[in-house]
Amino acid sequence: MPISVSAKKSLRVSLRRGQENRSVKSRVKNTIKKTTQDTLGQAYSAIDKAAKNHIMHPNKAARLKSRLAKKMAQPVEVSVPTPVKKAAKKPASRKKTPKA
């Protein structure tokens, strides 16, 4: 526990900032999850604001934006089951009988 006045204030400030940072991070995560082609700009904006305020590293922000762009550029895949090839059976090996 902090003892001095400045340490107590520092604890209060860090708790408050941590709470604000968590809310920004969760906003970014939720925006990314709900991103569509139309809302891509909003997601970029949320990521850029978090990077500008040092809530996330600028390289992480760039990585997230790159992955979002890549995800939005891909067409939606329709899963079609592929036929399973059966492996060819090996011929049974002949057992050698010992010579008497």
Image: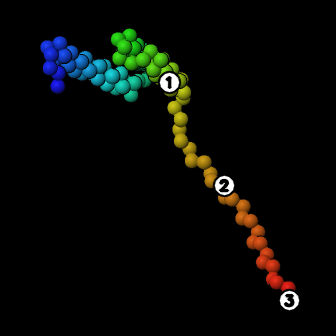
The residue under the point 69% across, 59% down is 87
Q: Dot 3, how many residues are within 10 Å of its Cα: few (below 14), some (14-19), or many (20+)? A: few
Closer to the camera: disc 3 or disc 2? 3
The residue under the point 78% across, 78% down is 95
Residue 52 in which image quadrant? top left
Query: Which residue carries the number 3 mark?
Result: 100
Q: Where is residue 11 in the image (x, y as percent from the top left)?
A: 20, 19
Instruction: Assign a secondary structure to mark 1.
Output: helix
The residue under the point 39% across, 18% down is 56
How far, Cα to Cα, is label 3 from label 2?
A: 45 Å
Instruction: Assign a secondary structure to mark 2.
Output: loop
Closer to the camera: disc 2 or disc 1? 1
**Mark 3 or 2 closer to N-term?**
2
Q: Where is residue 13 in the image (x, y as percent from the top left)?
A: 21, 15
Query: Which residue carries the number 1 mark?
Result: 67
Residue 53 in which image quadrant? top left
